[in-house]
């Protein structure tokens, strides 16, 4: 494994988010200078809190000041994030940022929709770069995602993924890979597909949650159209259609794969979904789902 770079200033966007918060904590724990960026400049232990809003270019310069590396998290619920991300990245390069690590998705290849357009542009903007392409997060079932809420409130997971399997990955493992990509002497210079150790269907996920919580959790499959319309109640239709399309692709086997990225870059095996569920639900007092009537 490569030695780490000398301490520098790392700008972490989405610093209170699922991966961003973990990246900040790991970097700060290593004694690195970290700028934790978010719309509210929320204080984070060991980091400098800075205000950043993708849709307010006036916040860019202050966030970038003194940073030579950046962890990029696209704006939420945008089907065209390149519209705001590419101008920011050009400004970042001009201000002295030399390495960029983008949080993408295993479901979106280079040149694909949404963040795939940013992936395509990144190598032309920075000599040092990486694109993290994690599978779907385990935290989707235990955090504040719509799946986690429906598990707690209704005892169901609703998808259009059928019995397609996905190698769900823990956000802690994604953050560990991100820190290596940001700090190793040699940047990966490629995309990194990040998965957990086992591909599971949503029915199998529900079974694990049932066993861990002691309360029944079931998978409720919808059609693509049904899932699109369900999502569109809380987000723009274009974005809802894209997410429902990802579910449909999962039903066809698009995410039924595992990779060795976590072990290869961090030296340890990725966490299993059962271990994640036990830690997130079984051992912390998080309310179990309501029983299914």
Image (cartoon, helix red, strand yellow):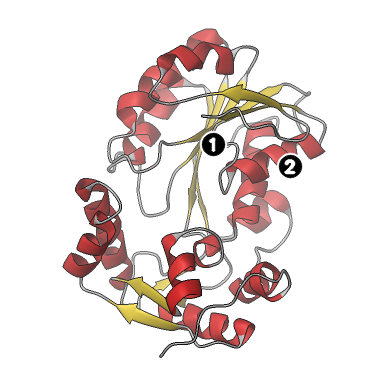
**SS class of the residue under badge 2?**
helix
Residue 9 lies, in percent from the top left, at 69, 21
Query: Which marked residue is nearer to the observer: mark 2 or mark 1?
Result: 1
Residue 135 lies, in percent from the top left, at 47, 58
Could you say which disc has been placed on residue 14 in the image?
1
Instruction: For the residues labelled 2 and 1, say whether their Cβ atoms are less than 8 Å apart.
Output: no
Could you say which disc has been placed on residue 172 in the image?
none
Front residue of this view, candidates 111 and 82: 82
For the question of whether residue 106 can be seen, the reply is yes
Q: Please indicate whether residue 38 sits to the left or right of residue 119 in the image.
A: right
**SS class of the residue under badge 1?**
loop
Question: Mark 1, residues whose alpha carbon is within 10 Å: few (<14), some, or many (≥20)?
Answer: many
Which residue sits at x=64%, y=69%? Answer: 286
Residue 257 lies, in percent from the top left, at 45, 67
Front residue of this view, candidates 194 and 12: 12
For the question of whether residue 97 can be seen, the reply is no
Could you say which disc has been placed on residue 26 in the image?
2
Which residue sits at x=35%, y=73%? Answer: 158
Residue 58 lies, in percent from the top left, at 45, 12
Front residue of this view, candidates 148 and 74: 148
């Amino acid at each position: 494994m490569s030695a780490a770079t000398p301490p520098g200033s790392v700008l972490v966007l989405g610093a209170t988010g699922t991966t961003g918060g973990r990246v900040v904590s790991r970097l700060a724990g290593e004694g690195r200078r970290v700028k934790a960026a978010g719309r509210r400049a929320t204080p984070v232990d060991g980091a400098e809190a800075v205000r950043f809003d993708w849709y307010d270019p006036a916040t860019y310069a202050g966030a970038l000041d003194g940073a030579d590396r950046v962890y990029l998290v696209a704006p939420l619920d945008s089907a065209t994030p390149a519209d705001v991300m590419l101008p920011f990245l050009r400004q970042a390069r001009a201000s002295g940022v030399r390495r960029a690590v983008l949080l993408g998705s295993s479901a979106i290849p280079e040149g694909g929709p949404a963040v795939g357009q940013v992936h395509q542009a990144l190598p032309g903007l920075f000599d040092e770069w990486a694109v993290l392409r994690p599978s779907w997060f385990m935290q989707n079932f235990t955090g504040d995602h719509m799946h986690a809420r429906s598990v707690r409130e209704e005892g169901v997971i609703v998808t259009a993924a059928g019995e397609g399997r996905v190698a769900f990955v823990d956000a802690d493992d994604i953050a560990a890979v991100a820190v290596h990509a940001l700090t190793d002497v040699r940047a990966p210079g490629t995309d990194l597909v990040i998965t957990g150790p086992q591909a599971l269907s949503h029915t199998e996920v529900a079974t694990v949650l049932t066993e861990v919580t002691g309360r029944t959790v079931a998978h409720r499959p919808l059609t693509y159209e049904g899932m699109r319309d369900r999502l569109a109640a809380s987000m723009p239709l274009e974005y809802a259609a894209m997410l429902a399309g990802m579910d449909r692709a999962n039903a066809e086997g698009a995410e039924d794969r595992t990779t060795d990225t976590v072990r290869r870059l961090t030296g340890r095996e990725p966490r299993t979904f059962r271990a994640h569920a036990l830690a997130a639900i079984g051992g912390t007092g998080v309310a179990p789902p309501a029983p299914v009537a």
